[in-house]
Amino acid sequence: MSRAITAGLLNVVLGLIFLMVAAALLTWIERRLLGFLQDRPGPNRVGPSGVLQVAADGIKLLFKQDWIPPFADPGIFVLAPAISMVTVMLAIAVIPATPVVGIIGNLNVGLLFFLAMSGLGVYSAVLAGWSSNNKYSLLGGMRAAAQMVSYEVFMGLALVGVVMLAGSFNLTTIVHNQLRLWYVVPQFIGFVIFFIGGVAETHRLPFDLPEGESELGAGFHTEYSGMKFGMFFVAEYIGILLVSAMTTVLFLGGWYGPFLPPFVWFGLKTGFFVCFFILLRAALPRPRYDQFMAFGWKLLLPLTLLNILITGALMLGLPAPT
Amino acid sequence: MLSSVRTLWYTFLHLFQRNVTVSYPEQMPYLAPRTRGRIILTRDPDGEERCVSCYLCAVACPVDCISLQKTEADGRWYPEHFRINFSRCIFCGFCEEACPTYAIQLTPDFEMSEYNRQNLVYEKEDLLIAGTGKYPDYNFYRVAGLAVPGKDKGEAAHERPPIDIRSLMP
């Protein structure tokens, strides 16, 4: 019994360390790749081809003054970045990298748990915006609330097709069901909408309306500095990993692939989406807020509902695959 | 929507293009010959100072970083001292435009950082170079009508002898 607990704890701690390192490296990968996409080298001075930039940034963040503005609500102000970290970490815990690698990959409501945690993630932005007691933060927080709640809807609905095909909320079972055909083929609309929703959920560019620098300063984390800002930052990058890994698991057959070991396949597919996130950031401008909401409610919502309808009709009409 | 996808594709293609930026200290960027950098004082082809202390550069300077004092020797004008405070200079090149004798010129050199601000004040001996700079053949006293030792009135290039104003002859 105690050995099982030790093994579980070790798994969690190792997963945590792996995630932190991955998120830190991701900041460097993103800046480097953005550089290449913009015909410039990117950070290449610190360490071999700039990889120690991560350490430099981390040290800088750690040694900054841990400042709480006198007009802020200190309790909630401290709580908000913690929420953003905790929710995104909990959500990533349910992802099965391979049948054996993963923290709680075999959870029977894994998909629902993921949606619940990304729903809770809204609170971090809202509370951060509210407790900062600053008009730009508040505007950013309100935008974050509206954006994340709306896109949560499409993200959830886009996954209904997958759940119908797999007949399970268990992510491991969903991957097992994609042994013959990845769900990206029958559920292409769901795949695209899930990914758009995922970008909006992590409020990454081009959907970074809650923190649009050009209009809101830095949005809900305007007042944050030092490691509290660092937590938002790390949570954002783990969010990228989360959405990429989720897309891989749900639509691209998780760890399945020829020749290479399962974990490598999972990493490659996830890395592809991470790079796509960065490409999106490099290529697309931020939409206006009303355009963004209209795009969600007037285009994506009908499309997802249509997708569910057609999937259901085909499942009823076609003979069940043996 | 389609234009967004096209944008993504074109941006992706930039991954395979050469970098525009140059890793500066290891690799020097190309600087055009007319880059406005460190200011120099040039000499004419005979090796004499071109500057005639007309003060036009000091007048044109928007930040008043040029200071000089006229002196006279053998009918020629020289700057007694010529001082440019590069901690004020904005490298606008107005002095070069104002100069009637091509004496003051801007060069593509920009690496002139100092730890001590006072070291950025360049005196005449720091500014004066041995060569002619961008205009190798120009010699002010050879084309100007002014009489100097070795060249009387009417002897300059493209100049006719002076008219005798007391004569009645055409």
Image (tube, rainbow, N blue to C red):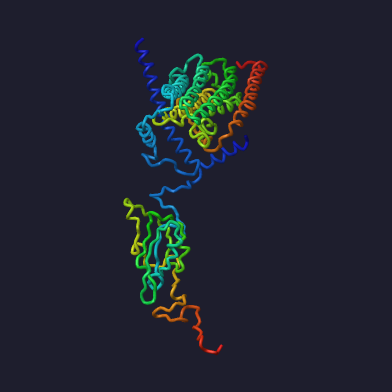
In the image, is residue B15 above or below residue B156? above
Q: Which of the pair B78/A317 is nearer the observer? A: B78
Q: Would you say A115 lies left or right of B115 here?
A: right
> Relative to the observer, which residue lies in front, B24 or A218?
A218
Q: Residue at x 46, y 61 (%)?
A: B60
Q: Confirm whether residue A62 shows in the render.
A: yes
In this rendering, would A78 be left or right of A38?
A: left
Residue A70 drawn at (x, y percent)? 41, 28
Q: Nearer the viewer, residue A2 or B23?
A: B23
- What residue is at 42 percent from the left and 26 percent from the top? A19
Q: Is residue A320 above or below residue B127?
A: above
Q: Position of residue B31 (x, y in %)?
A: 45, 56
Residue A82: x percent and y percent? 42, 23
Q: Is residue A259 something that shows in the picture?
A: no
**Vertical placement of residue B9 versus B155, above or below:** above
Q: For the image shown, how many numbered marks are present on the structure?
A: 0
Quarter of the picture containing the C terminus of chain A is top right
In percent of width and height, residue A67 lies at 38, 29
Q: Image quadrant for the N terminus of chain A?
A: top left
Horizontal relation, residue A139 to residue A75: left or right: right
Q: State which quadrant residue A7 falls in.
A: top left
